[in-house]
Image (cartoon, rainbow, N blue to C red):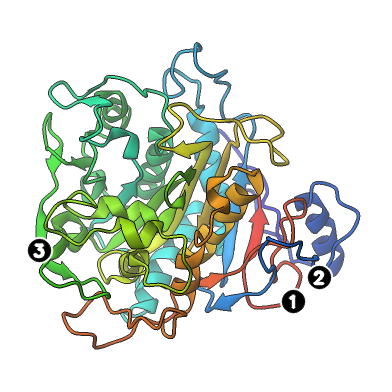
Amino acid sequence: MKTIPPVSSRRDPFRLSAPASPLTRRLFLQRSLVLAGGSAVVRLRAATPPGEHERLKPIGEAKGIHPGRVIWAHDPDVTDWKGPGDGHWWEGNRVQQERVDGMLARAVCALTGEGTVTAAWSRLFRQLNQSRGKGDVGYRAGERVLIKPNWVGLIYREGHVNTETYRFIRRQDYMNTAPHMILAVVRQLASVGVRPRDITVSDTLACVVHEYYDLLHGAYADVQCEDCAGRFERLKARPSEAPLYWSSRPEGKAPDHVPTSFAEAEYLINFANLKAHTAGGVTLCAKNHYGSLVRWPVEQGYYDLHPNCFSTKTGIYRPLVDLLGHAHLGGKTMLCLVDGLFSGVHPRDPVPQRMQLAPFHGQWPCSLLASQDPVAIDSVGYDFLWSEGTEFPRKGGVDDYLHEAALAADPPSGTFYDPNHAVATTRLASLGVHEHWNNPREKLYSRNLGAGNGIELVKV
C-alpha cells in the first residue's frame, strides 16, 4: 500500500508535493498496520466463521492502471454538521469544499500513481482510450464528459421534491451524492482542459432541485444539468437511438435505449453513494445505472429490473451486469467514485446514519472511494456496509451480481451476457475483480498481502 502526501498549498489544491515513495517490505508492513487500525498481526488468511463469506478468494480479472486498486480517502474534518437540527448538511460551510477537493486530489493521484492531478487525469483518459482500442491518446477539446450522480432522493415520483418549484418538500438531508463532490470533479476537469460546457451532470430519474443546482451553477454556469423534466434551464433526458438489450432476452417488452447525453459523451464518471438498500442489500456503482435509463425501473411495458436485482438467490441472471457491460455505460466509464461523506439505508432512512465500524466509531464516515474497476469498488463498498452489521447487506444473494460481473464471460448463472446486440453475439469479458477483505479490522485484500491478483485497498 502507498501513502500519498497531503495537498501542498491552498493556492494550488490539485498539486501534490511529490509522487508516492517506493514501497519497501518494511513500509508495506507499517502501512498495512495503519490501515488495520493499529493491529499488531497481519494474516494471509482469516478464519471463516459460519455464515460469513469466503475471504481473500479473488475471482475475475482486475482492471485499471494498477489492476484492482481501490482508493479510500478518509477525512474526519471534511464536515462539522452535527445532524438534524443543525441546518442542512449541504448548506453554508458544513461540508468544507476545500477538504472535499483535497480528498479527490489525493484519490486520483493515488489511483494512478501520479504526483499531480493534471498527470493523474491524463493517465485516466489515456488508459480508457487504450482499453477500448483508440490508442494512446488523451482528452481532446470538445469531447463530452458525463457525470452520473446518485440523486435517488430527488426522484420525481416519490414526493420529496416539488416538481413545479424544484424545491425540497422533505428529506432535505437524505444522503444523495453531495453537490460538493460533483463540484470537486468539475473543478478538476476544468483545470485539465475540459470546458465546463462540455460537462453534463445527469440523473434521468431526478428533479435537480435549486438547492443543489445553485451550488453547481453558481461556480460553473456553463455546466449542463440533466434531469427528468428539463425545467428551470435543466436539460430534459431523452432516449437516443442506441439500444440496450437485456441478456435474459425478455419477450413482449418495450425496447430500452440509453439517454442521448450518454450516447454522445466520450467519457463517463460513475459517482455513487455508500448506502445499504432494503431490497437490493446495497446500492453502489452498478445500481447507480438505474438512473441511466430514460424510464422508471419498473415502468409498465418495459422489462422490470427489480425481481432479478433484488432476488436473494445465487447463480441467477443479474441485470446490473448488462448495465455495467453496455458500451455506452460501463464501456465509457473512466472513473468510478463512491461518495461516503454520509451513509444510511435507502429508502428507510430520511437522514444519514453514523457508522460504528472502525475508524468511524459513531461518526459520519467522511469517506470517498475511487477505482477504475467497477467490480472492485463495489466489492469494497459492500464489505464496508456488510461489516457495519446492518441487516440488509447480509441477506442472501446481495453480492451475487459481483460474482456474475467478475465472471461475465462464464458466469455461475450460465447467462450469455451481451447487452450490445439484439441476438446474443459477443459475450462480455470479465468486468473486474471481486473478493472480500480478510476482516473488518485490518481491511486487507489479496494484493495488499501479496497473495493474489485481486483487490488492492489503498488508504489516503
- Residue at left offset 52%, top offset 37%: 343
- Residue at left offset 80%, top offset 65%: 46
Q: Mark 3–mark 2 contact, CB under 8 Å?
A: no
Within 10 Å of the Cα at label 3, are there few (<14), some (14-19), or many (20+) other Cα atoms? few
Nearer the observer: mark 3 or 2; the answer is 3
Q: Amino acid at mark 2?
A: Leu
Q: Mark 1–mark 2 contact, CB under 8 Å?
A: yes
- Label 3 and label 2: CA atoms lie apart by 50 Å
Q: Which residue is mark 1?
A: 451
Report the disc number at residue 16. none
Secondary structure category for the residue under label 3: loop
State whether residue 151 appears in this view: yes
Residue extending farthest to the bottom is 425
Earlier in the chain: of badge 1 and badge 2, it is 2
Place residue 308 in its image quadrant.
bottom left
Q: Quadrant of the N terminus?
A: bottom right
Residue 387, percent from left and from top = 66, 49
393 relative position to 279: left or right: right
Image mark count? 3
